[in-house]
Image (cartoon, helix red, strand yellow):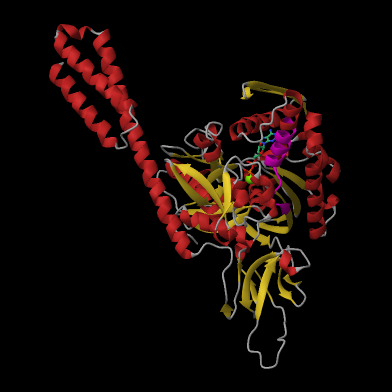
Amino acid sequence: MAKGRAIGIDLGTTYSCVAAWEEQNGRAEIIVNDQGNRTTPSFVAFTDTQRLIGDAAKNQAAFNPSNTIFDAKRLIGRKYKDPEIECDLNLWPFKVVPGADDKPMIKVNYKGQEKCLAAEEITSMILTKMKDIAGAYMGSSVENAVITVPAYFNDSQRKATKDASIIAGLNVIRIINEPTAAALAYGLQKRATFSGKRNVFIFDLGGGTFDVSLVTIEHEVFEVRATAGDTHLGGEDFDNRMVHHFVQEFKRKDRVDITGDPRALRRLRNECEKAKRTLSHANDTTIEIDALFQGIDFRFPITRARFEELNRDLFEKCMEIAQNCLDDAKMEKRELHDVVLVGGSSRVPKVQSLLEKFFERNDLCNSINPDEAVAYGAAIQAALLSESYSIVPSMVLVDVTPLSLGVQVKGDLMSVVIPRNTAIPVKMDGVYHTTKDNQSWMSLPVYEGERTKASENNLLDKFSFRGFLMLLEAILSMLCLNLIMMKGRLSSAEIKRMIEEAAVFREEDKKFKKIVEAKNALDYYIYRKERGLKDFNVSSKVSASQKEAILSAFTVGKTLLESEKHNEASVFEDYLKMLQNICQSIV
Ligand code: ADP
Ligand code: MG
């Protein structure tokens, strides 16, 4: 059990959300950010003067596309060579380069200097923002958090997410799966109406990832029966299809190619995302962007039917994955009691109609907020794991391993020890024989994944093998004689360096904020006093020469404010004090 209060963070590809348990109300509360929004864009931007996170970063994306980073969740825990990343590389307006050990590194320009950042660092910045949002609401800083990840995240993606949390100064009390969190939220809100056992199908289609889970709720026990998904399928892909379509259309009609222009692409992408949302309630819309490229205006209509056609295979893929999940759970469609929609992209009408057809029902449940359910559930889990709350709902969660775990045996074959969708925690043994006489130990590479050829799966570690022990949160931990190597995860030295760097960033953000505040204070003072001199008849008491002296001091102040040279708050604070003294002594 964690000491102190704990929050739940839904760390999304496109939007993140934070929630906290409210004992007195018996429910979780979604915490609004400094802009008054309930979700925060998972964006980080770097400029010549500062670092921006969340809404502020997203809002300036079109002006600063190559230094506005999003989609870090699509990079985290993956190798640069990963084919899933390859197709994104061409579409991202920022630069990603291969780093040590083939780790993808994001290149940005911050305060005129080039910086290479790991996806863990960008993610840690978003987490820091979510932590601060919660801290501001709760009155003091909160360190304990339950963080959600897609059910289909593999071990290295989970570990990398955990590393990002450490860098952000969070104490991760548990990593839980997004659809499982949504099931907790749904269960809490609905279970009073349940009688007996309830089979709930969670369909979570977000911005970057797609997850489905089949959860059985019986009294306080929430048991995940099976889970399936695609960590690279979501609303961003629908946007990409639309962007691609319009790039072609623009080429055809106006004979211009905008693919080399990050700013034009960013503007087009923003409008495509908006159009996509419009098409969830309208049958057609028009995208209009003034002077998109070489002064040429962009104006193209799109219908809902066309949008659906562009994404047909992606929508169908969702249904296939839903079928896989049912198969794994060995359950028939008719045994399901509820189909719950989660994730912003579950609002797409075609997705809903395909689902209705697939499940042969027309009562899909959209009574829980698709953008907030995951954070809500994470907050429930956080309360259950924290000592600080005395009134918590009685809920027990039993989750499963999303991927099969096994070892590589002769001929590069994957020998599965723990099949996917096994309830955890679990302990299973596999018996493997030595190949020579008197061999005292053996090294076995451990993989996770569903391919028959072991090397095509995700290598976790090479172990001297004796047995497996799965811990909760599906992060594989093994009891073994000899740990030979640790793969894919940041070393403790790297984490330490990133924590130090994060502190530098924070310090710089603070300093920047202080400068802005000092400048605003000076600016406001000059503005107010200047008006005072004009509006009121102070001149009777102030001689012409004194007035002139004040006005010229104001002019110097304004020049100071406009100059880019000063990056110390004290310059502006001192000048303000001086002005105040002058004005006081005269008036
Ligand atoms: P994630 O958790 O992956 O960040 P979310 O669940 O927050 O994703 O969903 C964000 C995605 O949902 C974005 O791609 C957004 O464009 C999409 N979305 C939000 N509202 C709508 C809508 N009304 N119609 C279609 N797509 C939508
Ligand atoms: Mg999500």
What residue do we see at 36% from left, 42% from top? 510
Residue 127 location (% of width, % of height): 50, 48
Residue 210 location (% of width, % of height): 71, 48
For the view shown, which residue lies furthest in the bottom direction? Answer: 438
Is residue 241 magenta-colored? yes
Residue 403 location (% of width, % of height): 71, 62
- As drawn, is 111 to the left or to the right of 528? right
Tag count: 0
What residue do we see at 66% from left, 67% from top? 459
Q: Which of the 4 quarters of the picture holds residue 526?
A: top left
Point out the stretch of residues depicted in magenta.
229-246
Residue 449 shows in this picture: yes
Q: Is residue 468 above or below residue 11?
A: below
Is residue 86 magenta-colored? no
- As drawn, is 471 to the left or to the right of 367? left
In the depicted view, which residue is nearer to us: 145 or 113? 113
For the view shown, which residue lies furthest in the front direction? Answer: 255
Magenta stretch: helix, strand or loop mostly: helix
Q: Which of the 4 quarters of the picture holds residue 279?
A: top right
- As drawn, is 69 to the left or to the right of 318? left
Residue 11 shows in this picture: no
In the depicted view, which residue is nearer to us: 520 or 98? 98
What residue do we see at 71% from left, 46% from top? 233
Q: Quadrant of the C terminus?
A: top left
